[in-house]
Image (cartoon, rainbow, N blue to C red):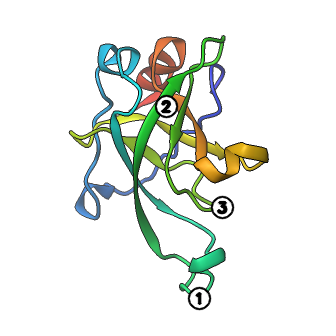
Amino acid sequence: MQFGDVALLYTKEDISKYMKIRKIAPEKSITNIKANTPIHMYHYGLPTGKFKNDPMGTMYHSKGKYSLMARNINPMGYYQIMAEPGSSGGAILNSKNEVLGIHAFRIDSGDYKKYHLNTMAELRSKLRKEVIQNII
């Protein structure tokens, strides 16, 4: 997408019979989210570390908390959650299971590593409009 590191995947088949389709959280709830708000993510990762013996394709559920919104051009947010390599593209959900954003990457250096700090493309502003316009 032009306004954020997000791609939309289109399928010919109706996938709602296999999985629940999540709603995008209201923009106001994304822009007003407070630090330490509980969040969670379902994701597939590349099993490493303590998960290295898990079979490929294992689905993980991680719980964490929202940290802060980046005040820059891109709609970026920071949060603390356990995310494995390969989790990129996983939906970050609020307590109502609405999508707040899309997991981008883990900040894996220095002091940030011990806090499990991650980034997401938040579905707000121009990115939100672009995503909604491109959903069929």
Instruction: Identify the secondary structure beneath mark 3.
Output: loop
Task: Check disc 3 and give the amino acid type.
Answer: Pro
Q: Residues within 10 Å of mark 2 (few under 14, many from 20)?
A: some
Q: Considering depth in this image, is 77 or 86 the residue closer to the camera?
A: 77
Instruction: Identify the secondary structure beneath mark 2.
Output: strand
**Viewport quadrant of the N terminus:** top right
Percent across and percent down for residue 75 are: 57, 20
The answer to whether residue 2 is above or below residue 82 is above
Instruction: Identify the secondary structure beneath mark 1.
Output: loop
> Alpha-carbon distance for marks 3 and 2?
20 Å
Circles 1 and 3 in contact, beta carbons < 8 Å: no
> Alpha-carbon distance for marks 1 and 3?
15 Å
Q: Which mark is first along the chain, 3 or 1?
A: 1
Task: Check disc 1 and give the amino acid type.
Answer: Asn
Q: Which mark is residue 53?
A: 1
**Residue 69 appears left or right of 108:** left
Q: Which mark is first along the chain, 2 or 3?
A: 2
According to the picture, the residue beneath numbered tag 2 turns out to be 67
Percent across and percent down for residue 122 are: 50, 27
Q: Considering depth in this image, is 123 or 106 the residue closer to the camera?
A: 106
Task: Check disc 2 and give the amino acid type.
Answer: Ser
Q: Considering depth in this image, is 134 or 98 the residue closer to the camera?
A: 98
Q: Quadrant of residue 87?
A: bottom right
**Viewport quadrant of the C terminus:** top left
Q: Which mark is residue 85?
A: 3
Residue at 38% of width from left, 33% of height from top?
Answer: 36
> Alpha-carbon distance for marks 1 and 2?
31 Å
Residue at 78% of width from left, 47% of height from top?
Answer: 109
Circles 3 and 2 in contact, beta carbons < 8 Å: no
Q: Considering depth in this image, is 132 or 102 the residue closer to the camera?
A: 102
